[in-house]
Image (cartoon, rainbow, N blue to C red):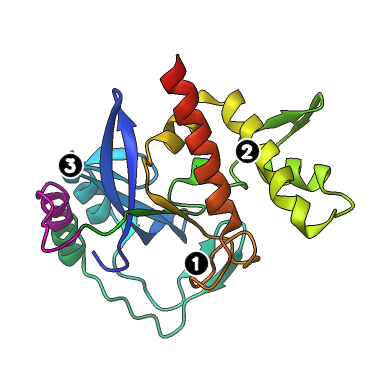
């Protein structure tokens, strides 16, 4: 699948690997930019989990658009709306379904080792491991104040902004509170194992890695909190 981005979900306590890509879902005359995830157990998630056969029916009905007509309306929720001009798509319904089936097979292939194993890495953004992202709507309570997400909790604690050197410590406090208050999110963080965490923040090369030139402080802090949670779990 082009633009491969790995992710996973949990099912009955089992970690199911998957691959994510952007697609357009067609609803009420508008093509909405959304995500399509294919999982190793044969399920497809595009606005809800379904089998490949059920998803193929949605493609056939035009609910997931592989072709876009001239002048069609498009939207990226919360970002933009537009009309397509000179629309050209690279997929046909048949090719989309073939890629999905091929990815399910590939996700179930044993890994190949042709040399020293590379250190694994996972990406955290609004689509991949979204529960770990600061903008995810996971409320955080600090000093008896409830904040709608970790990003807003940090802004409240860091207003006015303190010394640059103290900012990671403030963020670490927010993250410790978030994962202590939300065990499900903590399990997702722990499931990343010892992988390097690459945090995507297009607005900051301090917190995120940008095009891998950023400092990735959020990724480092998530790894720190993950290590602390691992020690806590081992002590129980």
Give the residue at x 27% y 76%: 90
Pointer 2 with pointer 3, Cβ within 8 A: no
> Label 3's element?
loop
Which of 105/88 is in front?
A: 105
Up the image or down, 119 lies above or below 209; here it is above
- Which residues, given as a range, are shown in magenta? 101-116
Q: Which residue is mark 1?
A: 74
Residue 184 visible, this angle:
no
Mark drawn on residue 103: none
Nearest to N terminus: mark 2 or mark 3 = 3
Q: Quadrant of the N terminus?
A: bottom left
Front residue of 50 and 104 = 104
Q: What is the spatial separation of the Cα atoms under label 2 and label 1, in whole angstroms?
A: 36 Å
Instruction: Please name the residue shown 63% across and 38% down the image.
Output: 175
The quadrant of the rendering that contains the C terminus is: top left
Q: CA distance from mark 1 to mark 3?
A: 29 Å
User: Does residue 229 appear left or right of residue 18 in this picture?
Assistant: right
User: Is the residue under label 1 in contact with that under label 2 (CB below 8 Å)?
Assistant: no
Q: Position of residue 52 (x, y in %)?
A: 18, 45
């Amino acid at each position: 699948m082009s633009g491969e981005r790995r992710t996973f979900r949990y099912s009955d306590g089992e970690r199911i690997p998957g691959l994510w890509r952007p697609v357009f879902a067609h609803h009420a005359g508008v093509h909405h930019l959304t995500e399509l995830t294919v999982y190793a157990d044969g399920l497809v998630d595009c606005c809800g989990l379904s089998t490949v056969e059920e998803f193929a029916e949605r493609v056939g009905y035009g609910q997931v658009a592989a072709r876009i007509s001239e002048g069609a309306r498009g939207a990226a929720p919360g970002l933009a709306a537009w009309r397509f001009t000179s629309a050209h798509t690279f997929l046909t319904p048949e090719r989309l379904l073939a890629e999905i089936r091929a990815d399910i097979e590939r996700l179930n292939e044993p890994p190949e080792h042709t040399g020293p194993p590379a250190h694994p890495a996972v990406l955290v953004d609004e689509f991949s491991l979204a529960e770990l992202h600061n903008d995810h709507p996971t409320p955080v309570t600090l000093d008896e104040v409830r904040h709608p997400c970790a990003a807003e909790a940090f802004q409240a604690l860091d207003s006015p902004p303190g010394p640059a050197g103290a900012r990671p410590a403030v963020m670490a406090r927010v993250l410790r509170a978030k994962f202590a208050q939300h065990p499900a999110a903590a399990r997702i963080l722990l499931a990343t194992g010892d992988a390097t965490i690459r945090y995507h923040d297009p607005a900051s090369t301090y917190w995120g890695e940008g095009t891998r030139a950023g400092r990735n402080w959020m990724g480092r802090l998530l790894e720190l909190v993950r290590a602390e949670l691992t020690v806590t779990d081992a002590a129980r």
